[in-house]
Amino acid sequence: MCQLIFNPATSGSRMTIACFISGSGTNYERIFEKDPSHRYIVFTNRPGCEGANKARQNKHTLIELDHLPFLASARERYRPGSVPRNCPEREAFEQEASRLIEKAAGRQPDLICLAGYDQWVTDWMVDRYYPRMLNVHPGDTTRGYDGLHWVPTARAILAGDDSLKSTLFIVDKGEDTGPVLAQSEPMHIQKTLEEIESMGAGGMVSDLCEVTGFARSHDITTYKGFKATAGTVYREKMQRICESLQNQLKYRGDWKIYPFGVHNLIARGRVAIDGRTLFVDGAALPAGGYQVGKEE
């Protein structure tokens, strides 16, 4: 059955938005700056982080809950960095986080924005809040460009793409597999590297030519293949290129589509969902979601 994600006609125009952060809180800042009129609750698993200080300055309700005490036994059992997504310890942490957030809000939040949050979200969390939890990814999730840090950009380059996109999606139980709400305007790879070079970072375009030439000569089209075959020099060049591109994509993509999706689409009651199909203004979205252009 098709249902609105948020209905201002019945819930009022002021949303309660919970932003989950772990670091600088820049995604949270961009969402808040787009429309300060909503009620914001900021949750962090890293007490004292830069984003928590911003929440205090903005006089927003701040909830700080360190995840490490909850995961201590699991980290010993599996070792740090290998704790399963759906282990009981993660669920216990999320249950306490949700309890604190809902106590502060007086109910469930209208929307949860994972805004630079560094923890996996368990199935328990998805079951509780789907489809009211959003995340942004610096890559085209419809093409399977998942991964952390600079890896999504490397996947796009190795696949032969000439441009990059950010993707805003509804969080589901997969890894960056949820229904896509919006994507950013394509950012041309070589043109962006030329612009970066003009600001003083030399060698970007030549490094790209070297890396892609190496990949073509070895019939490499995947990041897995590149990682297994490329030596240190090519891996370092790829990392430098991708980190520079993703820094630009953050400005041109993430920080544009996240506030747009929250305020221009969801908060205005324009977004509905039926199963995994999203609708904007009654029209079903394509797999790539709403395409956010320069004028928006």
Image (cartoon, rainbow, N blue to C red):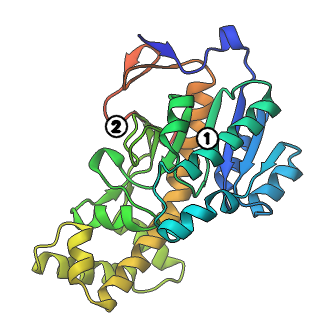
Residue 39 - label: none
The quarter in which the C terminus is drawn is top right
Residue depth check, mark 1 versus mark 2: number of the one nearer the observer? 1
Left or right relative to 75: residue 187: left
Residue 112 position, x and y percent, is 62, 36
Q: Residue at x 80, y 25 (%)?
A: 106
Q: Which residue is mark 1?
A: 113
Left or right relative to 50: residue 285: left
Q: Secondary structure at mark 1?
A: strand
Residue 173 position, x and y percent, is 42, 40
Q: Residue at x 66, y 8 (%)?
A: 9
Within-10-Å neighbours for mark 1: few <14, some 14–19, many 20+: many
Left or right relative to 242: residue 41: right
Q: Which residue is mark 2?
A: 288
Q: Nearer the viewer, residue 112 or 124?
A: 124
Residue type highlighted by circle 2: Gly
